[in-house]
Amino acid sequence: MVNQKYLDKAETLIEALPYIQRFNRKIVVVKYGGSAMLDEKLKANVIKDVVLLKLIGFKPIIVHGGGKEISRWVNKVGMEPRFINGLRVTDKDTMEIAEMVLAKVNKELVTLVESLGVQAVGISGKDGGLLQCHKKLSNGEDIGYVGDIEKVNPKVLQDLLERDFLPIVFPIGYDTNFDSYNINADDAACAIAEAVHAEKLVFLSDIEGVYKDKDDPNTLISELHVHEAEKLISEGYVGGGMIPKLQNCIDAIEEGVNRVHILDGRIPHSLLLEIFTNKGIGTAILREDGEKYYDEHE
């Protein structure tokens, strides 16, 4: 008699089959951040997940930040952080540290991917003119070298995907004077997903997803259409840091991305569970004509 656990494994693989068929040769942008970047075991799991996507025929692109690591190095060199309207002021010295730290994190991720037998290339938003930006103001105030994306030139990413590389991007861009700017990683992932016409955009963060009631973790929403997401924002169901993240999701959908997922990167293999199982474990935001895979009333 075959052991039940092996039968269960076979069932899991069969459940994944339609998703593998549906997304084969499609581009998936994964925004990687939060605690999953700081915990070595979680980091290894995330990279294994992305490598698996690559090996079964998806075309993943990783976009990562590194805010906590930048803060660590800013403190390490004895610099005093300044904030305006809750946002860190990025002066020239801080910008220099940010670029060095993000490049270091980037090459660590490249090395992890390469160690699993997949070729990866790490680039910044400067390479190939990928992310062109202008200075971002906070309520009209200058917060230094923080950029708002103006234009994305995806050619370098398309060339890498065509050559079977896994691109790993860190969000440093430049303006018309070729000055360097630090860009919010969520914004960068969103803009890149739109520019490459990604099938999926996945945000790995420190939250489970979108809640109907932000104070009740039992009200996690598995799937919602764009108008439902807009309603949650307008009626005050989501607050704080979730508002810009959800707005990014809505913008990406409106610019042609088919599905956007918000996942808890602290859960091992959350990326695989969301993409390859019927219910998933996070929140998926879909276009108005997007088909819901999971019926909440089942």
Image (spheres, helix red, strand yellow):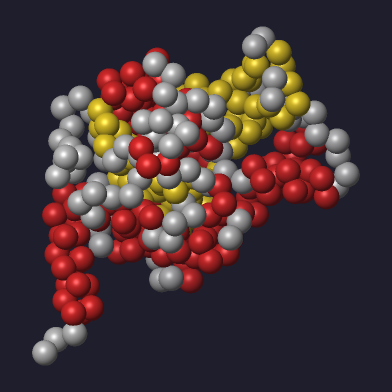
- In the rendered image of this protein, does residue 293 appear above or below residue 25? above
- In the rendered image of this protein, does residue 180 appear above or below residue 202? above
Give how far across and how far down residue 85 sits, in percent: 70, 20
Q: Which residue is the extreme one toward the bottom?
A: 1
Residue 235, located in which quarter of the rendered image? Answer: top left
Q: Which residue is the extreme one toward the top?
A: 140
- In the rendered image of this protein, does residue 103 appear above or below residue 288? below
Give how far across and how far down residue 84 sits, in percent: 73, 21
Residue at image point 60% right, 37% down? 172
Instruction: From the viewer's perspective, tell me whether residue 136 is left or right of residue 270.
Output: right
- In the rendered image of this protein, does residue 100 appear above or below residue 240? below
| In the foreground, 87 or 228 | 228
| In the foreground, 192 or 228 | 228
Residue at image point 60% right, 26% down? 147
| In the foreground, 71 or 195 | 71
Quadrant containing the C terminus in the rendered view: top left
Residue at image point 19% right, 85% down? 3
Instruction: From the viewer's perspective, tell me whether residue 237 is left or right of residue 241.
Output: left
| In the foreground, 206 or 170 | 206
Quadrant containing the N terminus in the rendered view: bottom left
Say whether residue 169 is visible: no
Instruction: From the viewer's perspective, tell me whether residue 79 is left or right of residue 114.
Output: right
Say whether residue 101 is visible: yes
Give how far across and how far down residue 206 sits, in percent: 51, 46
Residue at image point 25% right, 28% down? 225
Give how far across and how far down residue 138 sits, in percent: 65, 16
Q: Which residue is the extreme one toward the left?
A: 1
Instruction: From the viewer's perspective, tell me whether residue 289 is left or right of residue 268.
Output: left
